[in-house]
Amino acid sequence: MSQEKNTRAQIRLPIILALGISAGIWIGATFAEPKNDRNDLKSAIYKLQEIITYINRDYVDSVNTNELVEYGIEKMLNKLDPHSSYITAKDAKLAKSQLEGEFDGIGIEFGILRDTIYVVSPLTGGPSEKLGILPGDQIIKVDGDLVAGKGVTNRDVFDLLRGPKGSTVEVGIKRRNEDELLDFSITRDKIPQYSVNASYMINDEVGYIKITRFAANTHDEFRKALQSLKNEGMSRLVLDLQGNPGGYMGAAINIADEILTDNALIVSQEGKLKRYNQKAYAVRPGAFEDGSVIVLINEGSASASEIVAGALQDNDRGLIVGRRSFGKGLVQMPIDLSDGAELRLTIARYFTPSGRSIQKPYGDEDEDEYSRDYLKRLEHGEFFSADSITFDDSLKYETVTGRTVYGGGGIMPDFFVPLDTSMTSTYVNRLFGSESWREFILDYLDKNKKKYDNMSFEDYYHNYEVSDNMLDELIKVGEKNKVKFIEKDFSKSKKYLKTLIKAHMARNLYDDNAFYKVINDINEIYQQAIQLFEEAERLAMRISEEQEE
């Protein structure tokens, strides 16, 4: 058997690298870690270095070392907790932009239908709206390249259409009733992202604010919405955090501070290192410290949403209505890596003012067990009955006025509202899963939009009804997209389906406020909450009396 001989350079390179890495490890470990931990760390890193070196040099096939390292990083983080994560350089910039107040792009809300990018809506004030791009326009070409029918993904759309402010992208658009593609040269600009998606008056006293995530601008948006509603006479607030997955802790703290009185504890966090231990208090005069508050949560409300809900509940400042929240009480620190990737490392646990950790249990016995928690709750009956939820007495805590609350996994609402499945059905889920509803609405409004031109939203909301003929057309679109019609499901869900279509049409015709005002007519948590303000008032009076004493 013949053997390949390594050149002197090949022999020296691993040695030089090993010496350099070892020196760096020794310096860092010497000044950063206790002696025993230092030795363990050096040994572990050296072993990893050895394995990668042998694979890179001697493995029978060519390998991509970077891919191996990234795979190893992901597997390593899986052994820590469910929320420590690694984001590749390619995805890190996009991930950050989701929580920043704005991004550079062409300013459209888009969808992908039948393998084609289409414009759901041009964003108000954005470059696409200014050029006359319309809802329903299909983007066929980008910079001269065909993108329709190419298996385009959401990630591809971001890569194609986002770019630095001032840069230009050429798009070829197919518009209904136009034989030729329309060519647009779009100069990218700063596009604002909003996290307060709706704010409106429910009646003369009650205002409603919907927060979909906690981003860089959320606090400013919330203050503006509060002030606008107060100017309209709001003295009671419904704060909707249903389905809000969280985001920046600072935004959550600032919003809680607008509602809590001075010096109330909002949240505390504790880590292995003392520098991660801190407490946040209400430190400024808030914009809504007096009126009664109801907070809406459900199983999709997580992290920063739970900070707000937990702070208001433990301080007896707000009535929590809905279903038990997700249960994420771990704090991640974003760490920028040298190649542009990002490590989000859990560095602390956070606790509500009463001392509750609301992180639900996790372990390494079954990596998928944590992600199956939603299905376990559904099978256990938790979404339908509060009696199915049991709490360990060792996790019992008290609010400032002595009400009992529990830790150990999410925020349990003060008033439980069961999930209403009486109107939903498999057929409706398939219609929406196939995007048939979007296709129907775009086509319908394109043909009939003139009849809505002079219709105010109030007229639309109170008097407009989706007709049976419209549903017949929707059924046909579904069948074209291979969604088989199910008569029994359709009859069960007909009223529900009409409201869904009306709500999504309202978003196209008006704005997000219109969408939420219509859709909340079938939101069981919202409907229950607006009946509970007398209880919220009693809670507000109890805390006021406590403060006077």
Image: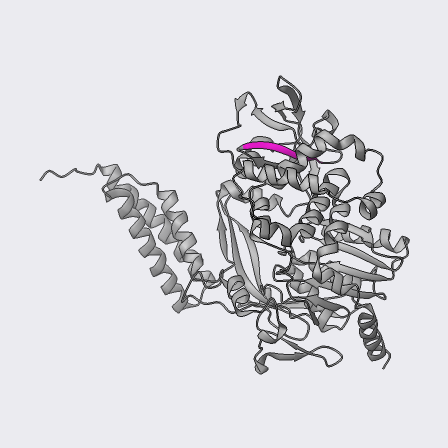
Specify the segment rendered in magenta.
Answer: 116-123
Closer-to-camera residue (344/81): 81
Q: Is residue 302 above or below residue 182?
A: below
Residue 202 percent location from the top left of the image: 83, 56
Q: Is residue 20 above or below residue 453?
A: below
Q: In the rendered image, which quarter contains the C terminus?
A: bottom right
Examine the structure image and report whether residue 117 is included in the region drawn in magenta.
yes
Q: Is residue 389 visible?
A: no
* Residue drawn at point x = 77 percent, y = 53 percent: 222
Count of marks, rendered view: 0
Q: In the rendered image, which quarter contains the N terminus?
A: top left
* Residue drawn at point x = 52 percent, y = 22 percent: 145
Q: Is residue 16 above or below residue 239?
A: above
Does residue 234 appear to the left or right of 378 in the view shown?
Answer: right
Residue 19 percent location from the top left of the image: 33, 49
Q: Is residue 98 visible?
A: yes
Residue 440 percent location from the top left of the image: 64, 37
* Residue drawn at point x = 59 percent, y = 45 percent: 432
Give the colouring mode of the picture: one colour
- Tell me which secondary structure the magenta stretch mostly adopts: strand
Closer-to-camera residue (228/201): 201
Q: Quadrant of residue 478?
A: top right
The residue sitting at the front extreme is: 487
Q: Is residue 242 above or below residue 267?
A: above
Residue 15 percent location from the top left of the image: 29, 46
Examine the structure image and report whether residue 374 is included in the region drawn in magenta.
no
